[in-house]
Amino acid sequence: MHFGNAWYPEHWPEERWEHDVKLMREAGTTVCRLAEFAWSSIEPTDGCYELEWIDRAITLLNKYGIATVLGTPTAAPPAWVTYYHPDTLAVDPTGRPASHGNRCHASANSPTYLKYSRRVVEHMARRFGNDTRVIGWQIDNEYHRVDYSDTAKRQFQHFLKDRFVTIDKLNEHWSTRYWSQTYDFWEQIPIPVGAHNPGLMLAFRQFVTFTWQEFQRHQIEAIRNNSHCGQWITTNLMGWFDGLDTYKVAKDLDFVSWDWYIGTGHHNYLNTGLIHDLNRGFKQKNFWVMETQPGTVNWSPNNNFLNKGEARVMAFHAAAHGADAFLYWQWRSAPGGQEQLHGSLLGADGNPRPFYEEASQIGSDFKRVSEALKDTTVKADVAILHSYEARWAINAQRHNSEFDPVQYMEQCYHPLARHNVSVDVISPNAPLEDYSLVVAPALNVLPDDTAAHITAWVQAGGVLLLTPRTGHKDEYDALHSTLQPGPLREVAGVEVQEYYSLYDRVPVEASWDGTSCGEGLIWAELLRPLSASTRVVAMYGASNGWLDGKPAATIHPFGEAGGKVIVVGAWLDERLQESLMLWVLAEAGLSGIESPPEVEITVRQAEDGRKVTFVINHGREARSVTLPASTAGQRDLLSDSIVPATISLPAYGVAVLANT
Amino acid sequence: MHFGNAWYPEHWPEERWEHDVKLMREAGTTVCRLAEFAWSSIEPTDGCYELEWIDRAITLLNKYGIATVLGTPTAAPPAWVTYYHPDTLAVDPTGRPASHGNRCHASANSPTYLKYSRRVVEHMARRFGNDTRVIGWQIDNEYHRVDYSDTAKRQFQHFLKDRFVTIDKLNEHWSTRYWSQTYDFWEQIPIPVGAHNPGLMLAFRQFVTFTWQEFQRHQIEAIRNNSHCGQWITTNLMGWFDGLDTYKVAKDLDFVSWDWYIGTGHHNYLNTGLIHDLNRGFKQKNFWVMETQPGTVNWSPNNNFLNKGEARVMAFHAAAHGADAFLYWQWRSAPGGQEQLHGSLLGADGNPRPFYEEASQIGSDFKRVSEALKDTTVKADVAILHSYEARWAINAQRHNSEFDPVQYMEQCYHPLARHNVSVDVISPNAPLEDYSLVVAPALNVLPDDTAAHITAWVQAGGVLLLTPRTGHKDEYDALHSTLQPGPLREVAGVEVQEYYSLYDRVPVEASWDGTSCGEGLIWAELLRPLSASTRVVAMYGASNGWLDGKPAATIHPFGEAGGKVIVVGAWLDERLQESLMLWVLAEAGLSGIESPPEVEITVRQAEDGRKVTFVINHGREARSVTLPASTAGQRDLLSDSIVPATISLPAYGVAVLANT
Amino acid sequence: MHFGNAWYPEHWPEERWEHDVKLMREAGTTVCRLAEFAWSSIEPTDGCYELEWIDRAITLLNKYGIATVLGTPTAAPPAWVTYYHPDTLAVDPTGRPASHGNRCHASANSPTYLKYSRRVVEHMARRFGNDTRVIGWQIDNEYHRVDYSDTAKRQFQHFLKDRFVTIDKLNEHWSTRYWSQTYDFWEQIPIPVGAHNPGLMLAFRQFVTFTWQEFQRHQIEAIRNNSHCGQWITTNLMGWFDGLDTYKVAKDLDFVSWDWYIGTGHHNYLNTGLIHDLNRGFKQKNFWVMETQPGTVNWSPNNNFLNKGEARVMAFHAAAHGADAFLYWQWRSAPGGQEQLHGSLLGADGNPRPFYEEASQIGSDFKRVSEALKDTTVKADVAILHSYEARWAINAQRHNSEFDPVQYMEQCYHPLARHNVSVDVISPNAPLEDYSLVVAPALNVLPDDTAAHITAWVQAGGVLLLTPRTGHKDEYDALHSTLQPGPLREVAGVEVQEYYSLYDRVPVEASWDGTSCGEGLIWAELLRPLSASTRVVAMYGASNGWLDGKPAATIHPFGEAGGKVIVVGAWLDERLQESLMLWVLAEAGLSGIESPPEVEITVRQAEDGRKVTFVINHGREARSVTLPASTAGQRDLLSDSIVPATISLPAYGVAVLANT
């Protein structure tokens, strides 16, 4: 379990450095990220490299037992790049090139920029690629910029040609006879700005993903060609950001990391657990939290500070969900620059800020649990399917502005998290054989091969939960020529006769639910059973006339191996959704672990059977927690004491249980 | 009474077509609109036309007794037009040309575009202009795009030269010495973007109108020159849309049609009745509803579905206000394209959606009433004056952001509609002799000749209601040099000493009102009687000090024929406005018909005296309705039964009464 | 005490002029502003001047005893300037040049525009610079436009070179190694659009200030070189507008004037008193209200009218705070033009509007007090420090969007105003020796020399109040390398261990406060005393864990002369802030004057000791006011009667007391 921060020694006189590193060490730092954004210090003029200062920083860190991660500096080109090569500047949707001085103003589509980026990374890799004090690399920073230049447009047209081969095929998949959009040749195809043809919009997202894959590939090659000592490569992602398909970008990395920032307000473990699980799912392995806020950020409407103790539960929450490292951004702020007011561990005077004390506590806590966590990860019986294509399609045509696909995913996740059921968030194309239950929230875009993959798993005995807006579109964001859930109709034993964006809520009476009635909101689908074995388990009450007394949810056995598909047609109210999820769990032969409000119990385990149980009180009220029987006789690694059957956790209290 | 839909056969394989047309026929379809947006299928490359597929579609429709309306496809140019002729693309206010693939991206100001548009329409007209299976044409689609190109600017400057002849006259009417705007020659005059000189802004709106008149004229000529079998020409308008002066555009059409969409929420008959009446007023004849939603649209924040039964009351409500046709958009959605999720009659699987059943009911209902409605229209004793110039002027300078001229018109209309008083919404320059009462809501721009026209009608015995913001501006949006109501001061017997945008509401005590007091909001004008015969009928209570105890409304007899002018100075609260309108009706010797809440009673009549009475329950509660004596002994054409004096209408119930 | 208005005779036929001037005279007008915006009437074509009409207008005004102020017309270039010299048009942040017809579309950075501007002013000055009927000049109008052209960028780069001399020094002060911003040469530096490097953003604001100084200098030279009869020069400012540093622009003027508009809502004397004091502070002398609204404006969301009587209290409120003139904008509106609906004294019909009567009352009231006010001004014992750099820095990085530096200044000012304590609002670099108490609200940017200046004053016995966000940045908007209050740490005896943007309010218990507890909101700083003599006077209660039980305010004696520094760490609730300010006043040996709610008592005094006391009821309720003992036996100049010890003021009542 690594603990650390981002350090920018290039901002400070070298005589100060050792003092900083000593303070890091005292806070329990084991890893430090360097050189991100330092291009102008690395290559001050075209082709002249200064790398010795990095070596000296690495040496100092190493002296105090701190490993180095090198960031490639390509998210911040020096002024000479953009001034002499204006074609490196990204162009915005209105056609204006970015200007120098805010990061990420360069274009990943610019051949010139690719050349310079690759070259500086090559120089760094030649110098440090076999330096064992450097354990790994982070490529660039938070990929997100989209270029609308003519260069990007031409590349997009080539990308489409590679994909569709003939323009006729493109016209067909995109229904371009609609509004006379028909393209005669590739050069006529625009980059979409604002709403446009769904096929074109989806393809452009895929092209942006491709752009970043290529951009990243250049740097990965530059490193791999020069590194032969086991250094890994990652990049730092941005949670729910959907500007690109992270599954594709993650493929070429050793593992992913992400930047966890709260902004305004406070940590909500029910939501962030889902994001950790999402990141763990990108490569189905543990991840790093590469950046997180030392109390506060500087870019939010209200950059309020975390409560005292809140950062520590966040650290353990991340670990409990599979984080293998936790790094604060940043160590100390330069006197100037856009993020002057961002949280940091040292103040402007070079001394520890109050937060440093809490960070140090985390550092020493991590030491206590590190050994036990070795080679452990989260093992889940439940998978939630997550697809960028589905989110892009829905977000491009919400139909009801409140239908936020991420919020709907949270809606499905919360009951599981509240009952401490571990969940993997994975691509619909990932292997499913390890799961007893698969939940597919709003899996709008559903290609036939993906449907076949899911069907096979149900056939083999899996329990599948389908929801509103599932199976509506094919891989080109075109409507399936069958009703929803499209290619899953047969396995689901039901089809969607009509979908209704709701103006008023609709009553829903469900057989799985103990109380008399719940409600549907935002969206409701009218289900029509297709098979005699389909059982209706919920009905709509009187509302818009169309739904009155019609099926709202069904269950359908499929195959000989006990497979079942539950289909729910409406976005349910929170309580009814909870009772649905508990029933679905039971149908899959699963159950959760009870815990008091705001208390999370999560397990990491190793291949060899070792288990580490995290008990985390995310609340500001002390709680008494009855521990799972499996932890009987185990030791709390933090307090170093054997735990009783019931423990008392103070506000923001944490226990980490294991055999020792 | 036509019933139908928009069909895009070019999206589908031809072997499917007959199945579609049969389903249409089963739903009672009598008319189908084709070819709108089909330019790329009609002229796939420059000068090569493919029209046979349209002929085959017409033939099929005709086989099943369905007439065809042809849409000219010019709202969606093919890619070869915009790619080889970028001067055809409209330029937005920031100077950027539109890009291909969203409709209406071409410029009606582009000579190249006019040439290609006219040519394709000519080819269609030559082929189908004498085909009696085609009953009429729709030009383009929902005119609205404004071009800010240099070409448009030069045309605007020519338009101004034609209008003002000398630059001095323009300078004078626009007060250009103000802020040194003085123009030395026409080439200096810009297209206004954002707020600008009121005279310039009004003139630009008139130029945009002129642009569409010319654009339309080209197509009308292309058709008329080639059509000699009685085909009519219309275009589809957009309700309250004020981007152009529809009175001018309507002049060259045989009748108007409009596209009635609800978007979010539900049908409110008090508002939509006004829009129907507006459309009937454009040419003072019946109109078509060329497009309406089969349950839902796809472009609104919440595309909720109409309630079951709601579409049927909408159809009869349209008919009751003078619609002679009612067409759903669209029959079936292409698999792709921007409007994938729009309502349709068939689903993605090619089968009827649930809504198809309601549509079929409407189709068969229409058959029952069609004969009786022949040659009937609405005859009104009350006219509401509506002027685009007035709306443009107020919207450009609301003074109080809540002073929405359309909302104010609705405020005046609602009491009349609630009391089932038929209303014509007409241009202030239309003939007035058939009306007993004329209401002029916020007739801000009031040229002298219009005032003379109105004055003559009062002189002849008319009763006129004037309101806040009336008669403030001349035809150049310059202030009249007399106080409001400007050239109507004498006939009104009153002038506006001062106008006040209100921060707090002001008490209003009115002699016409039974209760002690109402309120003015948003706007109040201080009235000063100019004549001994002017009688003050309402007073302001204590508020901002200026209005306290001053006249808020007056009545003034004018002429020997019993003419009267009522002036009300304030935007009244809803209740007081209702009592005002009832009193004004009584002053004009008129009265309404009482009906339960949400029940509308409307009459269409023929020159020969035949009357058809619509009784429509717009609500979701059953109502008992006492019918007007005039319907005694008549038959409800829908239930085919003689009606008693009091009938019971279920939720969304409709009765159509006539002698048979 | 001057009273008057802005008159645009060029909009009207000359035969009308004398009628207007007579009506002005009857309203008590003593001064009239002419020629602002009249460039196209003064120089209708390039190099041809028409100035006789101005002379004739001056002659008429003089005939009726009215003095003239000439506005230079450079805020509205004629069409021939912008058409033939498009380089005179300002460019917006997206790169588009402004278009003709809205004022202020020219660029103060354009050499061509400077040439034409200077030339037209020279012609005016040659003609009227020695005309004693013209008492002064107003330069341009409401400076505010920013030019983003390449010309402006090059000038900005030169400005930076002049300031920093070497690019290395710039890089150092702006921490440009951050994000590889490092500049190699001046030509690489962009104009910032949106958020950017704080050093760059601050420097650009200073450059904009410099631009206006230069623009103004050209006109001042043109006038001064041709005027030798004692004419003064001013310009009309815009209240809190922070687009430029008014202290720098004011340096070259004889006095400042400002344009006082309410927009939506009503006059709040607690806020506008502060703006008057701000304007008086720009040159530490009396000012003019060059424009104010005759009841209403036309550009606000709701242009509601002032209440009857409200304008009169505004006039006396301005006078009480040091206004020597009060001019309505405008006399009469041209029939057209963008401000058609703005309030005016005459209506569209050329006759007085109702407001004219109230204006006339003010005119005759002013005559009664004018003699007594001669050579008097406000003398204050309290100064509030105001710095544009501090406001720019905070507004660029609010950190909490609710931390509005102007609102915080109001928060500090209100308790003083409510207790009738006169205040000077001055630059932190202004002389302080006349003040007993100095309040420094959020003095974020605090250069070392300014800190030394303030420290010296405390050393000499001053009492200083410091607040949240003080002393955080140096003159380049870089973080001080010591904690807040930076270079005032020693004199304050305290430093800020951490600052917290607040999500929830925090309890604050203060020893100066009689009640048990108040609250902090928006912002709280954790104070750490640095000296044994620092006394903690307020503590935080339990909130985010970091602040709990920590110091919230301190007092620290400094020097031998009785100097003290109070530091308060939190934005306090209104009640607690009031008790703080009263305690601080007492610490400084000062006290206020009690008065009923909404009643203001203010004094102007002359060097010879004469005092004039204004007693103004800003409310709509009558109040009984006990007068200060100092006014015993004085006469109310308005009612011309000796005042008793307690007077009764009606709603919007005013008394002006003096010995006579």
Image (cartoon, coloured by chain):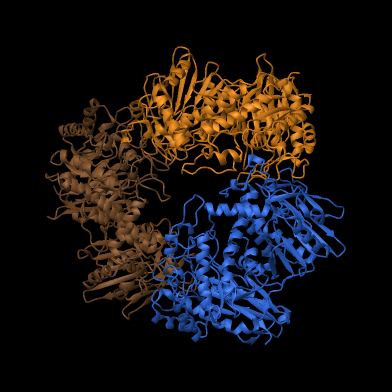
Chain colours: A orange, B brown, C blue
Q: Return the residue nearer the eye: B407 or B63.
A: B63
Q: Nearer the viewer, residue C576 or B582?
A: C576
Looking at the image, residue B574 lies above or below residue B123 = below
Residue B495, compared with residue A8, is above or below; it is below
Horizontally, residue C232 falls left or right of residue C351, namely right
Residue A490 occupies which quadrant of the picture?
top left
Instruction: Give the quadrant of the C terminus of chain C.
Output: bottom right
Q: Quadrant of residue A420?
A: top right
Q: Position of residue A599 (x, y in %)?
A: 66, 31
Q: Is residue B379 left or right of residue C327?
A: left
Lateral position of residue A442 relative to residue B68, left or right? right
Question: Residue B416 falls in which quadrant of the image?
Answer: bottom left
Most extreme residue toward the top is A560
Q: Position of residue A308 (x, y in %)?
A: 72, 40
x and y percent of residue C655 in the render?
62, 80
Q: Could one spot residue B418 in this view of the protein?
A: no
Expressed as whole percent of the image width and height from the top left, the position of residue A375 reads 68, 18
